[in-house]
Image (cartoon, grey):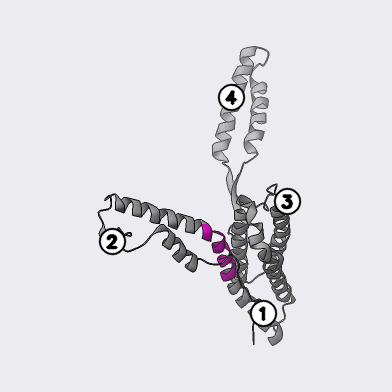
Amino acid sequence: MCPYGGNSMEKKLRESIVPIYAVGAAWIIYALFFPLYRLIDFFAASAFSVAVYFAAKVIFPPKEVLVERKLMELTGDEKADAFIEEANGYLKAMRASRNSIKNAQVGAKQQRIEEITLKIFDYLRENPDSAQDIHRFTSYYLPTTAKLMDSYALLEAKGATTPNIKGTMDKIDAMLDKVITAFDKQLDSLYAYEAMDVSAEITVMQNILNSEGLLEDNSMDLAGAGVTAESAVKDFEKQAPSSGITLTLEEKE
C-alpha cells in the first residue's frame, strides 16, 4: 500500500466482525440460562441479542482505513473509454513503481502526478467529447512519465551509488517537477472554455446592472470604460491557455 497518501488512496470504514459473533454468543448464552419454547422467549432472546450487538458496536467501532482508490470506470463512449483503459494501465504501472520507491520526496512527486492524472480523466469522464484534447497526454506524456518512474525504482533498487546512476536518478527527480507543472497546465487548459463562458456571463450581467443604475460602485462601471461582453471574451481568449501542452522529457547537460 502506498505510504504517501493522496488521491490514489481513499478512506473507508471497516466494520468489526466482533458484533456479529457477539450476537451468536448471546443466543447461546440465553439458551443456556432461559427457556426457548414459547414465542415470548424468542422475543426476549432477540431483544437480548440486539442489545449485545449494539453494545459490541460501541466497544468495537468501525475503523477508518486507507484503501487503494479504484481505477477509473468507463463512460460508455467508445473513444473516451479507449483513453481511459489505456490510462488505467499506466496508473497501475505508476502505483507499482511508487510503492517500491524508498525516497519519500520522489514518491510524493509521483503521488502528485497521479492526483492530477485522475483529475484530468475525471474531466474526460464528465466530458467524453474532449477525448481528442488529451490525445498526446495519453499517448506520450503519461506512458513516458510511467517509464521514468519505473526507471527510478529500478535504479534505486540496485543500491548503487556510482556518479552515473546517481546522476540519472537526480535527472529523473528534477524531471518529475517539470511533469507536475506540465500536467497542471493540461488540466487547466481543459477548463479554459468554461472559464471564458463564466467571464463573459459576469461581464454581461455587470453591464446590464450598470445600464439600469443598479450598481452603486463606480469602479464596476464597465460600460463607461468601453468594456463589452464581446471584448471581454476576446481579452480572455488571448490570456487563456491553449488546449495542448508542451513537455520536454529530455534535459540538456
Report x, y in % for residue 71.
68, 53
Residues marked 3 and 1 touching at CB (< 8 Å) = no
Q: Secondary structure at mark 4?
A: helix
Residues marked 3 and 2 touching at CB (< 8 Å) = no
Residue at 64% across, 33% down: 22
Residues marked 4 and 2 touching at CB (< 8 Å) = no
What amino acid is at disc 2? Ser
Please tell me whether residue 208 is drawn above or below residue 17 in the rendered image.
below
Give the residue pinned by disc 1.
Answer: 250
Horizontal side of residue 52 vs 206, given as left or right: right
Distance between the Cα atoms at labels 3 and 1?
33 Å
Give the residue pinned by disc 2.
Answer: 219
Q: Select label 4 or label 3 by which is in front.
A: 3
Residue at 44% across, 57% down: 199
Q: Earlier in the sequence, mark 3 or mark 2?
A: 3
What amino acid is at disc 3? Glu
Would you say residue 40 is visible in this rendering? yes
Q: Secondary structure at mark 3?
A: helix
Distance between the Cα atoms at labels 2 and 1?
48 Å
Give the residue pinned by disc 3.
Answer: 78
| Residue 48 numbered mark, or none | 4
The span shown in magenta is 181-193
Report x, y in % for residue 28.
68, 26
